[in-house]
Image (cartoon, rainbow, N blue to C red):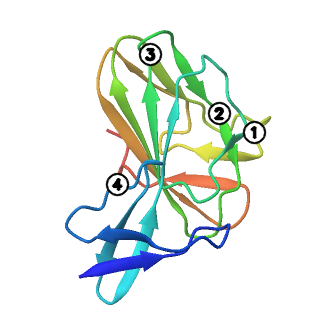
Amino acid sequence: MKLIFRETDGVTGNRLTFGDGAIPDGSYFRRVGRRIIGETTLRLSAAGPTDDLDVTGISTVFIDTSSNNVILGGTIGGTNGQVLRVVVHDKTNNATIENEEGSGNQDFFLHAGADEILTGEYGGWVFVNDGGDHWHDASHAKHV
C-alpha cells in the first residue's frame, strides 16, 4: 500500500510506503486503525536555558548533550492534548527540565514539583499539554 501526500507548497507525487516510513526531514507516518498520524522530531543541543522552544507539530524532542549541558524550561506552540516526548539520546553532559520556570510561555509541571536533571544517563519524559500554558508530566504515576 502506498500513501500519496501533498506538501504545503502544493507539490504532489511524493510517495511513502507504510513499511518504510522514513521521510528526509525526520518525520514519519504511522497507521493507527484507519487514520494516518504524522510525527515529527526536533533535536535540541543549545546550552540554554531554552524557555520558548517551538514545538508546533512536534511529537519528540531529542536532547543532545554531546557538547554541553542542555536546559529546557518551556515551549511555545503546544496544543490541547498534544503529547511531547523528550528523550536524552547522548549522556555526555547533563539534561535539565525546569519545573514551572515562569519565563517560559508553556511551562513544564514535573511530578515532584522541582527541576529534574539527568546526569550522565539516558532517559526522558512524556508530557501532555492541557490546552493552556502547561505541560503535565505523565512519565510517573508517583514520585519515585
Question: Which residue position is annotated with label 4?
Answer: 141
Q: Earlier in the sequence, mark 1 or mark 2?
A: 2
- The answer to which of marks 4 and 3 sits earlier in the sequence is 3
Q: Amino acid at mark 2?
A: Gly
Judge whether 85 appears above or below 97 on screen.
below
Q: Give the Cα distance between marks 2 and 4.
A: 22 Å
Q: Categorize mark 3 by other alpha carbons within 10 Å: few (<14), some (14-19), many (20+).
A: many
Asked whether 29 or 50 is in front, the reply is: 29
User: Depth check: 22 or 63 in front?
Assistant: 22
* Structural distance between the alpha carbons of marks 1 and 2: 6 Å
> Is 85 or 15 nearer to us in this picture?
15
Q: Disc 4 marks which amino acid?
A: Ala
The quarter of the picture where residue 51 lies is top right
> Which residue is painted at 32% across and 55% down in the image?
22
> Within 10 angstroms of label 2, few (less than 14), some, or many (20 or more) residues?
many
Label 1: how many residues lie within 10 Å, few (<14), some (14-19) or many (20+)?
many
Q: Nearer the viewer, mark 4 or mark 1?
A: 1
Q: For the residues carrying marks 4 and 3, which lies nearer the camera in this image?
A: 3
